[in-house]
Image: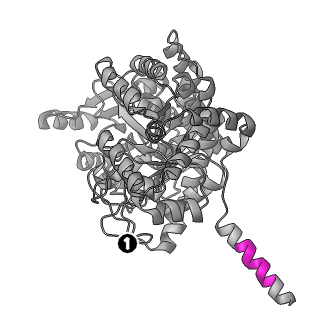
Amino acid sequence: MKSFLILFLLLFFTCRTVFAQWETNLYSQASRDEMKKWVDSVFNAMTPDERIGQLFMLTVDPAQKWREKTLEYIENQKIGGILFAKGSLTDHAESTNIYQEASKIPLFISFDGEWGLAMRLPNTPQFPRNMALGAIENNESIRLYGEEVGREMNELGVHMNFAPVLDVNVNPGNPVIGNRSFGEQSQLVAEKGVAYCAGLESRKVIAVAKHFPGHGDTKGDSHKTLPVVSHDKKRMKEVDLHPFEEYIKKGFSGIMTGHLFVPAFDGTAGLASSLSSKIVRDLLHKELGFTGLIITDALVMEGALGTKTNPSLQALLAGNDVLLKPGDLLAAIKAIKDAIAAGTLSMETVDEKCLKILSYKYIVGLNKYKPIQMEGLSQRINTEYANQLVEKLNQEAVTLLKNKEDAIPFKDSSQKVAVLSIGAGDSSHFQKTLSLHGSFDNFNLPEKASAQKIQEVFKNLQKYDVVICGIHSNQKNYSAQLHSLALKRKVHLVFFMTPYNLSKYSNSITGAQSVTLAYENAQAAQKAAAQVIMGELPAKGRLPVTISNLFKYGSGIQTQ
């Protein structure tokens, strides 16, 4: 009898663990009584059409010429949210104020800002992309970054950010994820993603992790096709699902379902994971215990269009809460109404989704909506602190991959030194920063340099003892010329590009004195790399992916 009782208790608690429901932090922090009071007051005054409209989030252009059409969607289809595409800071803010004023129920304003506002809006702080952040060892820096992005989104009236990307990019040839991922190792992706979300949601901006159940090992782009993820359940759970599980357990609020074919979880031919009840309802909600908002990737994408059923209806039946960017909004609404009339979809399901959406609108403060203050908006977003944080993140990411004879930090000022910039225009920020530390001769090769120009530059470089070469573009490959130069002179290579592109320079890397990776070509990255080369800053970064046969995951030489 005692053994039976122990077995019963073990099974009971095991089942509770497997099917635990993880309440989100933002939800648990809200005043339940006040939230219920506001949600009920709004919901009870809504018509069935308004409740259906709340489920839809449209992508719109904030430019003035598109406003009339968007206002029609708000007034006639009663949409619940907006995702702006392109535009300027002013257009975005002005349009938000106009649309919020026109909407009976406050709108969710979302943003697709994987590396902050600069992903969509010019003249905003240009933070590094995720792969550069994956090189940073100090997760507190990532949290501060998330917090700052949240602050900027507060200023711009944004309540939901479609970030972070939690895809584990184990495939260097992935055509759509690449440097949008933190790296190739699932625990690293989980740690960086959780740190970022802790900062973002501290500002009450809803994080939306993507692309569930994992887009990191695909050969196709879900914008253009339905990519296949061919791994078995064990491998999927160990790698692809791990960051999402950590995210859920830490209590963050949103997950975006990706348009992927994942036969390990649902083998229905041509069915995207975003439209599969086995993946959305059974795996994400029931097994992993996610209780936050489930948002589809854009339903106009090719990956969502492989079945005869209207994708918006199918996504709703699968368990999604928010239907993003349907190809035909009127057709989607009609399909939902027809399904309710036919009994294949209950109005109770629509009501349940609507109540959930309204609850999160309360949580982010839409019960006390205030218009964006236009005056001084740019100054409030582009602060000195934001600029300093951009520099700090780039500095901590710079990764020293090779350092023969401890050549970096560069010390020997007695030698004749040239600085070559490839693909950076007439003068690079890298060269300008280096010039603050010594008297160097600068050479530049534009992306479309003639054969004569290339020959002339490399001939002149033979006159120098040391050549520091910044490679800013991969449009032309100069590996052969740099390899020949490295046989006779000391060559230091500095790459301002995604790590995977270094494999095209394997010959020149073999002969180089040092190899430094700054991950991207932004001014802050160029400045940080130059400071590390000259010893003004230490090299701290660790490589978040493997580069062919050149450098392993985790590589990175630390300097003082």
x%, y% of residue 90? 42, 16
- Residue 250 part of the magenta-drawn span: no
Q: Answer with the quarter of the image where residue 231 lies.
A: bottom left
Identify the element where label 1 is drawn: loop
Q: Amino acid at mark 1?
A: Gly
Q: Is residue 72 left or right of residue 399?
A: left
| Residue where numbered disc 1 is placed | 267
Q: Could one spot residue 537 in this view of the protein?
A: no
Q: Which residues are magenta?
A: 6-14
Residue most extreme to the front: 341
The figure's colour scheme reads: one colour
Give the residue at x 62% y 29%: 365
In this picture, residue 34 sits left or right of residue 47: right
Q: Is residue 37 left or right of residue 437?
A: right
Task: State whether residue 296 is above or below residue 531.
Answer: below
Say few, some or many: other residues with alpha carbon within 10 Å of mark 1 (under 14 / 14 to 19 / 20 or more).
Answer: some
Counting from the top left corner in percent of width and height, residue 336 is at 38, 49
Which residue is pictured at 36% across the width and 35% down the height? 59
Q: Is residue 9 magenta?
A: yes
User: Relative to the observer, which residue lies in front, 484 or 420?
Assistant: 420
Residue 399: image x %, image y %? 50, 45
